[in-house]
């Protein structure tokens, strides 16, 4: 696992622009049950993933149909395309120079709560990145095959703190929409909070040190990870069961 921490104010500028852009942007964050390879469960969600190539309309009878090369990203909403640029800027600069984001699942919520995902993160055969925007998110990660060596603690974890490449993102636009979030099975959401809020009403993202701890048990090695606004975790090498504790209004972008 790799961790990029954005808990320096200068490193949160670009994530903050993407955070506001996604709220005011041209994607419908619908309340729905997600059943996707990268996430499952009820959230305010949006997802974009590659589709199977389709035959071109000008196929010749008797010949194999040529496949369209049109990418799903050609028609992606502008705010999602900008979020993709941010993800790739972090990933390519620090770990994977050739990493291209093909799929993004956005999970958003209004208040506090805790939920265990019914499906693992599929990081055994591909890299999976998790970007936190907004309030802190606490993750519990359990690799299906266990850690091959003792998971690092906060004193030994390698954390990158570097300036992100500047992205050409628009300034935030103030929008105020009231909403409710009946999502939790073991915690109540804050009533009256809007997913789309005035910029000044959104709490200042945390810049406290990122927390990475491990607590192995007899059956499983468990990694507890707190992501603050702008933090990105990159998982690879195994599939991970995971639980997410939400501390306030925020969203995560899960990309592969």
Image: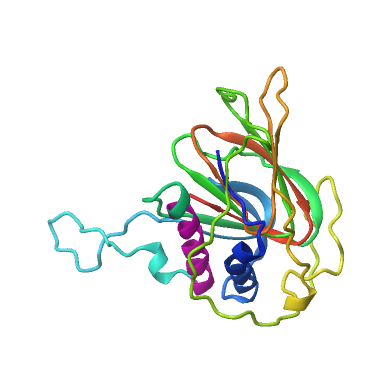
Observer able to see residue 118: yes
Front-most of 15 and 37?
A: 15
- Front-most of 64 and 159? 159
Task: Please tell me how many numbered marks the rendered image carries.
Answer: 0
Q: Position of residue 112 (x, y in %)?
A: 81, 54
| Relative horizontal placement of residue 147, taking residue 94 as reference (left or right) | right
Read off the magenta span.
77-92
Is residue 177 visible in this depiction of the protein? no
Residue 94: x and y, percent? 47, 50
- Residue at 65% x, 82% y: name it: 173
Residue visible at 50% across and 58% down in the picture: 87
Res 248 quadrant in image: bottom right
Q: In this view, does 216 lie above or below 36?
A: above
Which residue is outermost to the top?
218
Left or right of 98? Residue 55 is left
Q: Magenta includes 83?
A: yes
């Amino acid at each position: 696992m790799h961790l990029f921490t954005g808990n320096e104010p200068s490193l949160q500028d670009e994530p903050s622009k993407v955070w506001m852009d996604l709220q005011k942007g041209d994607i419908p964050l619908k309340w729905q049950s997600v059943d996707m390879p990268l996430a499952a469960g009820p959230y305010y969600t949006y997802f974009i993933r590659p589709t199977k190539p389709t035959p071109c309309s000008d196929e010749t009878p008797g010949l194999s149909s040529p496949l369209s090369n049109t990418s799903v990203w050609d028609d992606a909403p502008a705010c999602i395309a900008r979020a993709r640029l941010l993800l790739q800027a972090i990933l390519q600069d620090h770990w994977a120079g050739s990493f291209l984001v093909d799929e993004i699942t956005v999970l958003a919520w209004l208040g506090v709560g805790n939920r265990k995902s019914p499906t693992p993160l599929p990081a055994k055969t591909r890299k999976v990145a998790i970007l936190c925007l907004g309030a802190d998110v606490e993750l519990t990660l359990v690799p299906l095959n266990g850690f091959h060596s003792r998971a690092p603690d906060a004193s030994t974890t390698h954390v990158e703190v570097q300036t992100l490449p500047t992205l050409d993102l628009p300034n935030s636009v103030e929008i105020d929409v009231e909403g409710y979030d009946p999502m939790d099975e073991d915690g109540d959401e804050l009533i009256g909070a809007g997913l789309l809020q005035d910029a000044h009403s959104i709490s200042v993202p945390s810049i406290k040190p990122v927390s990475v701890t491990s607590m192995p048990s007899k059956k499983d090695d468990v990694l507890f990870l707190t992501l603050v606004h702008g933090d990105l975790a990159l998982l690879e090498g195994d599939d991970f069961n995971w639980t997410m504790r939400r501390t306030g209004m925020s969203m995560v972008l899960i990309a592969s």
